[in-house]
Amino acid sequence: MPEVRQNARGAIVIDDRYAPILITTFFGETNLELGKWFEEMNKKITLSQAAHGRRLISISDATAASKPSPEMRRFWADLSNNSSESMKNATLGTFIVIDNAVLRGAITAIGWLSPALRDLESFSTVDDAIREAMARLIKARLPLPQLAQPYQLPELAQAARTTFAR
């Protein structure tokens, strides 16, 4: 079931309707409160999929996100560096969608802090990331979700999109 968490500066939408593809959309500024919520929800969903014998592909759409603060760059690096073996084993791929050079630079900087994030694969659109995710699922002989393209945010996320649209 999709989840949304929002505060005055940003929002995160975690959409698990298409598991084993998990699509997270970031709007505006992600602060520590939102980051910790994401960490908790992502772990819960990933380990739940693993308990059912499924590996997950995580797609993070950062096209509507603000550049992360130094505190959040450290948070993302630490989150990646401290990922448990069970989380790593449950993840088939981790993709990020970025269409902006400033954010791409911030992700590169986070990669310097976290060698694990160097495996993060970058795409310019969510639909490109979804196509690659489907190809990986086929290659791994995992079930494909019924996911129509172009991807549409869940209805409950429309307010966040309107509030934080660039």
Image (cartoon, rainbow, N blue to C red):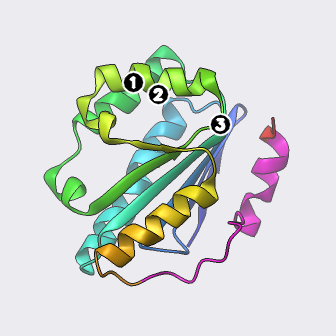
Residue 131 % position (x, y): 53, 65
Q: How far is disc 1 from disc 3 in space, using C-alphas?
A: 17 Å
Q: Residues within 10 Å of mark 2 (few under 14, many from 20)?
A: many
The disc, 1 or 3, on the residue closer to the chain's N-terminal end is 3
Considering depth in this image, is 149 or 35 the residue closer to the camera? 149
Mark 2 residue element = helix
Q: Residues within 10 Å of mark 3 (few under 14, many from 20)?
A: some
Mark 3 residue element = loop
Residue 104 image-quadrant placement: top right
Q: Is residue 67 visible?
A: no
Residue 113 % position (x, y): 30, 21
For badge 2, the amino acid type reads Ile
Q: Which label sits on residue 95?
A: none
Count of marks, rendered view: 3
Q: Disc 2 designates what residue?
A: 107
Q: Residues within 10 Å of mark 1 (few under 14, many from 20)?
A: many
Magenta stretch encompasses residue 155:
yes
Q: Which label sits on residue 110?
A: 1
The disc, 2 or 3, on the residue closer to the chain's N-terminal end is 3
> Answer yes or no: do the residues labelled 2 and 3 have beta carbons within 8 Å?
no
Range of magenta residues: 144-163
> Answer yes or no: do the residues labelled 1 and 2 have beta carbons within 8 Å?
yes
Q: How far is disc 2 from disc 3 in space, using C-alphas?
A: 12 Å
Q: Is residue 108 above or below residue 155?
A: above
Magenta stretch encompasses residue 95:
no
Q: Which label sits on residue 99?
A: 3
Residue 65 % position (x, y): 65, 35
Q: Is residue 166 above or below residue 87?
A: above
